[in-house]
Image (cartoon, helix red, strand yellow):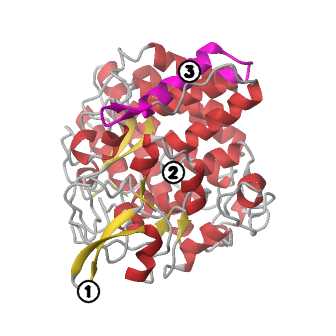
Amino acid sequence: MKTFKYYVLAAGLAFLGCSDLEEEPIGRLSPNGFYSTPKDVQTTVNGAYGLMAEEAFWGRKLSLPLMVRGDLARIGINTAQRRLDHDEFTVSDDNGMITEYWPRAYQIIATCNQAIAGAESVSAEADVLNAITAQAYFVRAYVYYHLVRLHGDIPYLDEPVSNLEEASSISKTPAAEVYQNIITDLQYAEQWLPDTQSTRALPSKASAMAYLASVYLTLGEYPMAASKAQEVINNEGRFDLALEDDFADLWDFSKQQASREPLFAFDFNGFRDGNFGQDYMPPLTGIRDNITPVGEGWSVIMSNEEFYNAWPSDDYRRDISFVTESTFSVNGTPTMLPYQNWSQADSRNLPEPFIAKYNRNLGNTSNGNGRGSELNYAQMRYAEVLLIAAEALNEAGPSPVAEGYLNRVRARARNAGGVIRTAPLDITGLSQDDFRDAVLTERTYELAFEFKRWYDIKRRQLGPEVFSGPDAYEQRPNFDPNRDYLLPIPGDEIARNPNLGPNNPGY
């Protein structure tokens, strides 16, 4: 077994605060002699989970670019240029968001690789050990799935690094090969993960199947995407999956732990150790100088009036996804103001609707402005599996089954906190093209601000339409389809290893 010294961080605790996992803080270790029980492998995997919840990955550096590169959210004012560059499509190869999430992503991958390699020295029942190792395969696939969609050809490592010189000269792996490796990892995870887990912060068999469906959809392999998504749907009872009755409950920290809708989630816990467990989305999307139990937000990420107005007003999900009124202190008196007047209360607020999902019910926080919340961030929800199946089935032609999956999502949207609305209506009898548009629109509403929209724009090559077309929510004239569907490889990585060049076109 290749060996090297590595860190297993005591970060699993920050990620799994409300979860039923036992975490042992581990410092600098050599894998020689460490791996003797399945619990040792689980400890390493828990370190990978913790790294994902760190500020340099999902806490801010990766999640923020994913949010603002789509057409539903935008950067406000008075914030760092490295963030504005993603909103304005002026990214360079030294962008500070990329140069932080990139090494963190490979640290997560390295931790997974060490868990997989370390398991080889453990003597245990196959079904016990492989179920733990399968978590590492799943997490590795999850991280590479982000990287390959964002950057295209990337370095691919699937075992621990023992020869630094060899690792420093690695070349990029073609994106097509990376995708096949992701599929292989997810297939292993599907084989060995259990049907259910004690917490949605751990992947299950259905998690792997749902991500396989998503990968196949991204690759345009629609029959495979439909088949894998339908395997999940047809076994929803076995996998303990269901749509939440009330869409609002998905964003209530006190109800997230019991929810049957997430298939994999990041579980924050309201406390932090440095940047570990640091959840920045509440303050990033919060409103400046308003009066809330956790203090003011930063007005860094918001939506825009065009998207708000385009969303049918009788759709309950719009009510839950946006905040359009908030309380401010006006001459010492608490006063409710509409979003059009928020800039009068504080000039750093733009007169636009703000994002509500990460500020309504975020639980305890580790400081005064919402960082370190108790929120869970579902990376895949059952509603998305239904929409994947609907979209993929439609590519073979109009299908009543596809309509049924789409309409299940729309039916849940009619339940406005126990009051059943008439909208959105069921969809039936559409042409293949119109149904495809209907599913993409449904994804826009159902998954708004959940870090999915940019990937939809990319895989359907919608950039010119959504960033400059007559129906664009916001004009972004810098978008270049020959450049901006991919982000650059960090320039400092290429400087250290020229084999990673040349960079992606335009950078």
**What residue is disc 3 on?**
228
Q: Position of residue 125 (x, y in %)?
A: 29, 20
Write the residue at 37% across / 24% down: 242
Whether the magenta-drawn stretch holds residue 404 is answered as yes
Task: Give the side of residue 438 with respect to residue 416, left or right.
Answer: right
Q: Helix, strand, or loop for circle 3?
A: helix
**What residue is disc 1 on?**
331
Numbered marks: total: 3
In this picture, which residue range is highlighted in magenta?
A: 393-421
**What residue is disc 2 on?**
451
Which of discs 2 and 3 lies nearer the camera? The answer is 2
Q: Helix, strand, or loop for circle 1?
A: loop
Whether the magenta-drawn stretch holds residue 106 is answered as no
Residue in the foreground of this view, choosing between 12 and 400? 400
For marks 2 and 3, give the CA distance: 22 Å
For marks 1 and 2, give the CA distance: 38 Å
Residue in the foreground of this view, choosing between 186 and 253? 253
Q: Is residue 106 visible?
A: yes
Write the residue at 23% across / 51% down: 13
For marks 3 and 1, give the CA distance: 58 Å
Q: Position of residue 15 (x, y in %)?
A: 29, 51
Q: Amino acid at mark 2?
A: Phe
Q: Helix, strand, or loop for circle 2?
A: loop
